[in-house]
Image (tube, rainbow, N blue to C red):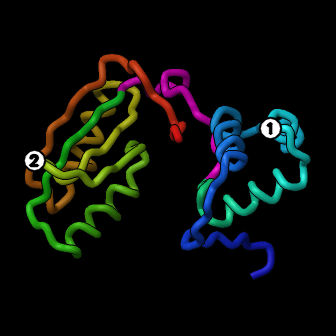
Amino acid sequence: MPGKKENNTDIQLNLDEKDLGILKLLQQDAKMTIRDIARQLNLSTTPVYERIRKMEQAGVIKQYAAIVDPRKINKSLTVLCYITLKEHNKKCGRKFIQEILGFTEVTECLNISGEFDFMIKVQVKDMDEYREFYVNKLGELDNLSHTQSIFVISVIKATHQVVF
């Protein structure tokens, strides 16, 4: 399809030190120009551009994004909610995941092992907004057995960077 970017995550790349250097710089500042990356890594711009393009196509670089401080946009309450499902089959699991994907308050959803099946991270304005979410959205899901909400007091470390 013209104009559509191919993204083949099945491509396996052998990343070398130059690729890792590019990734480190882009994780620190995704707006960094190819010229600046090339200068810092002592490379010319064309190979840097080609390496970035290959990593994008292979799915190594999934997306470029701005990291927003939730407190600055009136979403200062973070809640980690652990969830256990009643039924554990593909159909019920898929339905739960589809419903969670539709909740804008949920910023992360992890399928976990142990006592609970899922952990969701919820960003809301305050306790009233969380109660509204918990009662009228999460509480309305059919397959919930048990939930436990953990309220974040302060964030000690939060990073989007993968260390390699």
The label shown at residue 41 is 1
Secondary structure mainly formed by the magenta segment: loop
Quarter of the picture holding the N terminus: bottom right
Based on the picture, tell me whether residue 67 belongs to the magenta stretch. Answer: yes
Which kind of residue does numbered mark 1 sit on? Leu
Residue 118 pos. (x, y %): 23, 51
Image side of residue 118 versus residue 66, left or right: left
Q: Which residue does the numbered mark 2 point to in the structure image? A: 115
In whole angstroms, how far apart are the C-alphas of marks 2 and 1?
46 Å
Query: Which residue is drawn at the image coordinates 61% and 72% (left, top)?
Result: 8
Instruction: Specify the segment rendered in magenta.
Output: 63-77
Q: Please tell me which residue lies in front, 122 or 12.
A: 12
Query: Which residue is drawn at the image coordinates 80% and 38% (left, top)?
Result: 41
Q: Please tell me which residue lies in front, 70 or 32.
A: 32
Image side of residue 38 versus residue 160, left or right: right
Residue 15 pos. (x, y %): 63, 55
Query: Which residue is drawn at the image coordinates 76% and 38% (left, top)?
Result: 31
Based on the picture, tell me whether residue 119 belongs to the magenta stretch. Answer: no
Instruction: Determine the image quadrant of residue 148.
Output: top left
